[in-house]
Amino acid sequence: LWRRIGNGIWKGDAMSDLVVLITKAFDFTARKHVGQRRKGADQEPYVNHVAEVARLLAEATNGQDPVLIVAGLLHDTVEDTDTTYEKLKAEFGQEVANLVLEVTDDKSLPKDVRKRLQVETVGKKSDRAKMLKLADQQSVRDHQQPTDRLVLEAAEGYFEWAAQVAEGCRGVNGALDEAFDAAHVAGIEVLVGSKSNF
Ligand code: ZN
């Protein structure tokens, strides 16, 4: 049932190896994101975001794709921490490392270019990368707590952009498509509701 990933990480088909792999990824990502906080009023620890993405992926695939779940936990480590592709490959195997790389932006480009490229390129990515992006786009709590009008307007722009990225990810996993739509509608409702505050 399970495919082997990496050298020496995965010694058999035993569930226990999977448990070790996933908890190892959780520990790794928590340490790497240790000082980072999400935007938004609650200032949640960043690791809350990657935990949510991994949980969404696990639920949407009924726990059948550990590579996807591990990559979900690690998906922002190369982009936002000092983690390298080589390190991920050594610790978690090439399949995981390649998937993380597929959803990693080129940080040398300006932010608006990176966002445009995401919309343009996501449709050509692998099914796993599309699922990961879709889960990433619906983990949006930090955009739902605008503290002033400027933040509110930025959040509206974010939701518009997220919908464009999501468009290119649809059709791989129905549960994720539906979950994105529900999160998106709920998020916009919160934004609209908060408008009267400013
Ligand atoms: Zn993310």
Image: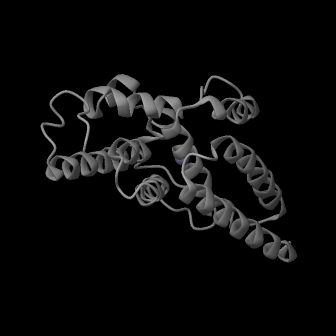
Res. 165 in view: yes
Considering depth in this image, is 180 or 48 the residue closer to the camera?
Answer: 180
Considering depth in this image, is 96 or 1 the residue closer to the camera?
Answer: 1
* Left or right: 197, with 70 as reference point: right
Considering depth in this image, is 43 or 103 the residue closer to the camera?
Answer: 103
The number of numbered discs placed on residues in the rendered structure image is: 0
Q: Position of residue 51 (x, y in %)?
A: 42, 56
Q: Position of residue 21 (x, y in %)?
A: 24, 45
Residue 70 to residue 151: above or below: above
Q: Which residue is drawn at 32% across and 50% down?
A: 26
Q: Which residue is drawn at 44% across and 49% down?
A: 35
Considering depth in this image, is 67 or 46 the residue closer to the camera?
Answer: 67
* Left or right: 108, with 29 as reference point: right
Q: Position of residue 2 (x, y in %)?
A: 25, 42
The chosen color scheme is one colour
Q: In which quarter of the image is the N terminus?
A: top left
Q: In which quarter of the image is the C terminus?
A: bottom right
Residue 163 to residue 6: above or below: below
Q: Where is residue 179 in the image (x, y as percent from the top left)?
A: 59, 62
Q: Residue at x 56, y 45 (%)?
A: 172
* Left or right: 37, with 6 as reference point: right
Res. 146 in view: no
Residue 9 to residue 39: above or below: above
Residue 162 to residue 148: above or below: above
